[in-house]
Image: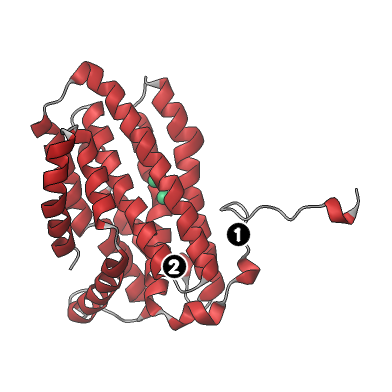
Amino acid sequence: MQESTIQAPRWGLDNIPFEQIDVSKARENEDLFYLVTSASFIEIASDLYTSNLIQHFSGDDDVVRWLEDHWQHEEMRHGYSLRDYALKVWPEFDWQSAYGSFFEEYSSMCTMEEFEPTRGLEMVARCVVETGTATFYTALSQHSTEPVLTGIAARIRAEEVGHYKHFFQYYKHYCQHESPSRWRVLGAIRRRVVEARNSDAEVALWHVYAHRHPGADRTRDRQAFKKMMSGLGKAVKQHYPVSMAAKMVLRPLGLPARVNHVIEGPLSRAASLLLR
Ligand SMILES: [Fe+2]
Ligand SMILES: [Fe+2]
């Protein structure tokens, strides 16, 4: 083969040009350290959740196959891409031991009891989770000032949107048998939105923070930690695609287009307030 015909491998999540990272540019922005590292923790720990989820859907071969062959693999790849980025840009940070202490706490939070009562409603909950990740990576890709990270976040975002579409299709499938009322669907959405506000991200960020500030105490240093989180929240909020989030979260309700149109505005404003 002539040299000119050899093509460079395509840049993707399996093939990230880590050598092209502008390390000093990434290090200029402390937000990126917290966002990338905490996201890597949550993505990698999703492996634990996947086996619970697969168990929950056992007997439905189509769903189980997709979860095992695609979803699980892609979520892991998101986590490892972000972890490797963090190792390259912040080598002084002991990622492994911070992840270890995060995992110890996080694994005790994931139990079978947290699933929704029916398979269809669990699919609604999964749609809410994927809305959260798709919109988070939208914001991260825009907040990033370092081109390789911008590319990683944009590619992860595309896969999260794909996950949402799959879960939504499975939800429609289960609806044929379960026919859940809009109130039940709304209940599943609400439970997952409330839960998302106060759990995973905060736990992950705490362990990143605590390893960044050796000796930090969860009670004594609460104020400083909250201040860091609030600064991070403000930064993400600037780029958060609020109307995309509202559209995705509302979709399982199957509301008529004109109703969706009327409530999207107030919902977007409410979401903006929650992001403060
Ligand atoms: Fe992911
Ligand atoms: Fe996902």
Q: Position of residue 199 (x, y in %)?
A: 23, 57
Tell me which residue sits at (27%, 22%) in the image.
174
Tell me which residue sits at (16%, 33%) in the image.
256
Q: Position of residue 173 (x, y in %)?
A: 30, 22
Mark 1 C-beta to ligand 1 under 8 Å: no
Q: Amino acid at mark 2?
A: Ser
| Image side of residue 129 versus residue 163, left or right | left
**Quarter placement of the C terminus:** bottom left
| Image side of residue 148 versus residue 203, left or right | right
Q: Which residue is mark 1?
A: 16
Q: Secondary structure at mark 1?
A: loop
Q: How many marks?
A: 2
Tell me which residue sits at (47%, 72%) in the image.
94
Disc 1 versus disc 2: distance between alpha carbons?
Answer: 24 Å
Q: Which residue is mark 2?
A: 97
Q: Residue furthest top?
A: 177
Q: Residue furthest front?
A: 258
Tell me which residue sits at (24%, 17%) in the image.
176
